[in-house]
Image (cartoon, rainbow, N blue to C red):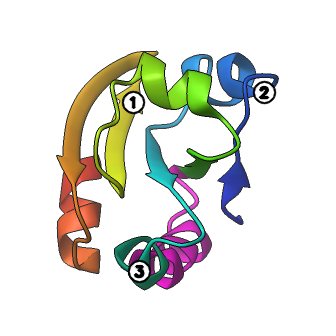
């Protein structure tokens, strides 16, 4: 499975109604740490079909960033059954990202 790109049009169906735990990454194209974890997120998406990996570009979706009170990027949220169950700010190694999803 590949990383999904989320906007206000597909947010509810892909994130809130997901039957899988979701790792939602708020990022920007110009953000160095965001680019550092992008490859890791692609790996997790490919290796772990039991999770949904999704990204929100804060420059293109300011409403979603505001709704999640994103102040720094990357901001990572784990959502299960429509609820935030874990969150972190800043780049993290793969093992920590996987641990957030458990």
Asked if residue 47 lies left or right of residue 74, the reply is: right
Count of numbered labels shown in the rendering: 3
Q: Can residue 18 be seen in this view?
A: no
Question: 43 or 25: nearer the eye?
Answer: 25
Mark 2 or mark 1: which comes first in sequence?
Answer: 2
Asked if residue 1 lies left or right of residue 28, the reply is: right
- Crowding near the residue tagged with mark 1, few <14, some 14–19, many ≥20 C-alpha atoms within 10 Å: many
Kindly identify which numbered label has been placed on residue 10. Answer: 2
**What's the distance in space between the residues labelled 3 and 2, CA to CA?**
26 Å
Nearer the viewer's eye, disc 3 or disc 2?
3
Q: Where is residue 92 in the image (x, y as percent from the top left)?
A: 22, 71
Q: Which residue is drawn at 71% across and 66% down?
A: 2
Segment tinted magenta in the rendering: 37-52
Question: Which secondary structure dominates the residues rendered in magenta?
Answer: helix
Q: Position of residue 57 (x, y in %)?
A: 62, 50
Residue 79, above or below 47 = above
**What's the distance in space between the residues labelled 2 and 1, CA to CA?**
15 Å
Residue 92, above or below 3 = below
- Crowding near the residue tagged with mark 2, few <14, some 14–19, many ≥20 C-alpha atoms within 10 Å: few
Nearer the viewer's eye, disc 3 or disc 1?
3
Q: Where is residue 68 in the image (x, y as percent from the top left)?
A: 39, 24
Nearer the viewer's eye, disc 2 or disc 1?
2
Residue that numbered label 1 is attached to: 79
- Crowding near the residue tagged with mark 3, few <14, some 14–19, many ≥20 C-alpha atoms within 10 Å: few
Residue 87, above or below 83 = below
Quadrant, the N terminus: bottom right
Residue that numbered label 3 is attached to: 32
Marks 3/1 in contact by CB < 8 Å: the verdict is no
Which structural element holds mark 2?
loop
Residue 2 painted magenta: no
């Amino acid at each position: 499975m590949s990383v999904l790109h989320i906007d206000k049009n597909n947010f509810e169906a892909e994130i809130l109604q997901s039957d899988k735990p979701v790792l939602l990454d708020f990022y920007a194209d110009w953000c160095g740490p965001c680019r550092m974890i992008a490859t890791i997120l692609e790996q997790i998406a490919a290796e772990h079909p039991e999770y949904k990996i999704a990204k929100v570009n804060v420059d293109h979706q300011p409403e979603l960033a505001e709704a999640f009170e994103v102040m720094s990027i990357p901001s990572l949220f784990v959502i299960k059954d429509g609820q935030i169950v874990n969150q972190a700010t800043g780049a993290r190694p793969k093992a920590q990202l996987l641990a957030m999803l458990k």
